[in-house]
């Protein structure tokens, strides 16, 4: 899905400037390219660096900050502006900013990541599609999981099966026993059972908007003025 990077007011500014300056089609197209290349792309870089929207509002923080300082050391989305590129449509009357193909940090196409971050999204997941990773199945339970199991009253099966009851005896295990005999996936499942939690079949992940493409009206006016001036003075960058 494509959405305008500039708003209606800014679009009217551009049209008025082209009309008043009596720019021929070739120069009008050059102005649009310059606005995108030397105005909007650098603005996107500044917004990401400052972690703010084009209007100056701070982005929504990550949901899970670092334990130590209560915040992440690394800034979000720093790699996205590097993937921005410009495309002029066939008629030459409009210019489009797009993201070049290339993996982002998540391994996803940069354009998909950018769209979700720019506009926000609610993503639905289904338990039938989720699989425990190989690491969860093979790595031993963590100390934190072991402590949680013991606090919930977990008892490990011991000895042979009783012929009368058909059950094995149970005893309180040590932290070491849990970490040596249970995987992370097993420990997680038992914790859920002991807590009486039901596994969710469907859940939602809400990603807040962290807009970085675009410019405020005041900033866009400065961009337009600078590129018009450069165009009139024969800017060739």
Image (spheres, rainbow, N blue to C red):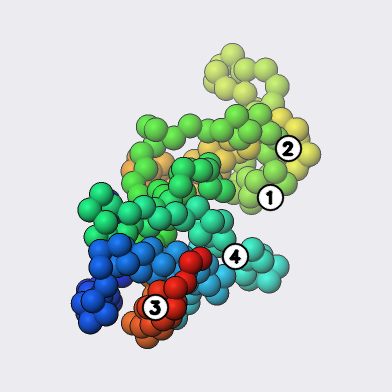
* Contact between labelled residues 3 and 2, with CB atoms less than 8 Å apart: no
* Contact between labelled residues 1 and 2, with CB atoms less than 8 Å apart: no
Mark 2 residue element: helix
Gap between marks 3 and 1, in whole Å?
Answer: 67 Å
Residue at image mark 4: 75
Look at 25% across and 68% down and name the residue there.
24
Instruction: Tell me if 70 is positioned left or right of 63 in this view.
Output: right
Q: 80 above or below 102?
A: below
Badge 2 local density, few (<14 within 10 Å), some, or many (20+)? Answer: many
Instruction: Tell me if 181 is positioned left or right of 216 in this view.
Output: right
**Disc count in the image?**
4
* Contact between labelled residues 1 and 4, with CB atoms less than 8 Å apart: no
Residue at image mark 2: 179
Q: Position of residue 203 (x, y in %)?
A: 36, 48
Which residue is nearer to you in this view: 212 or 67?
212
Q: Position of residue 113 (x, y in %)?
A: 44, 51
Examine the image and state in which quarter residue 36 appears.
Answer: bottom left
Badge 1 local density, few (<14 within 10 Å), some, or many (20+)? Answer: few
Nearer the N terminus, badge 4 or badge 2? 4
Gap between marks 2 and 3, in whole Å?
Answer: 72 Å
Residue at image mark 1: 144
Gap between marks 4 and 1, in whole Å?
Answer: 28 Å
Which residue is nearer to you in this view: 146 or 109?
109
* Contact between labelled residues 1 and 3, with CB atoms less than 8 Å apart: no
Nearer the N terminus, badge 2 or badge 1? 1
Gap between marks 4 and 3, in whole Å?
Answer: 39 Å
Gap between marks 2 and 1, in whole Å?
Answer: 10 Å
Q: Position of residue 192 (x, y in %)?
A: 50, 43
Q: Nearer the viewer, mark 3 or mark 1?
A: 3
Residue at image mark 3: 232
Q: Is residue 209 visible?
A: no
């Amino acid at each position: 899905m494509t959405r305008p990077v500039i708003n209606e007011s800014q679009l009217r500014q551009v049209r008025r400037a082209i009309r008043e300056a009596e720019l021929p089609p070739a120069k009008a197209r050059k102005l649009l390219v310059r606005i995108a290349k030397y105005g909007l792309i650098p603005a996107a870089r500044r917004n990401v660096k400052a972690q703010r929207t084009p209007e100056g509002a701070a982005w929504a923080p990550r949901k899970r900050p670092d334990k130590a300082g209560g915040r992440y050391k690394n800034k979000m989305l720093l790699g996205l502006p590097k993937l921005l590129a410009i495309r002029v449509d066939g008629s030459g009357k409009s210019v489009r900013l797009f993201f070049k193909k290339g993996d982002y940090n998540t391994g996803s196409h940069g354009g998909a990541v950018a769209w979700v971050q720019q506009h926000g999204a609610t993503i639905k997941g289904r338990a039938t599609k989720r699989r425990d990773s190989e690491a969860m199945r093979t790595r031993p339970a963590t100390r934190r999981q072991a402590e949680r199991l013991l606090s919930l009253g977990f008892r490990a099966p011991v000895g042979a099966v009783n012929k009368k009851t058909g059950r094995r005896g149970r005893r309180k295990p040590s932290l070491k026993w849990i970490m040596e005999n249970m995987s992370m996936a097993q420990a997680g499942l038992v914790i859920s059972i002991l807590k009486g939690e039901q596994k969710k079949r469907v859940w939602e992940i809400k990603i807040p908007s962290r807009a970085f493409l675009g410019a405020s009206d005041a900033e866009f006016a400065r961009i337009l003025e600078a590129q018009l001036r450069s165009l009139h003075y024969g800017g060739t960058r």
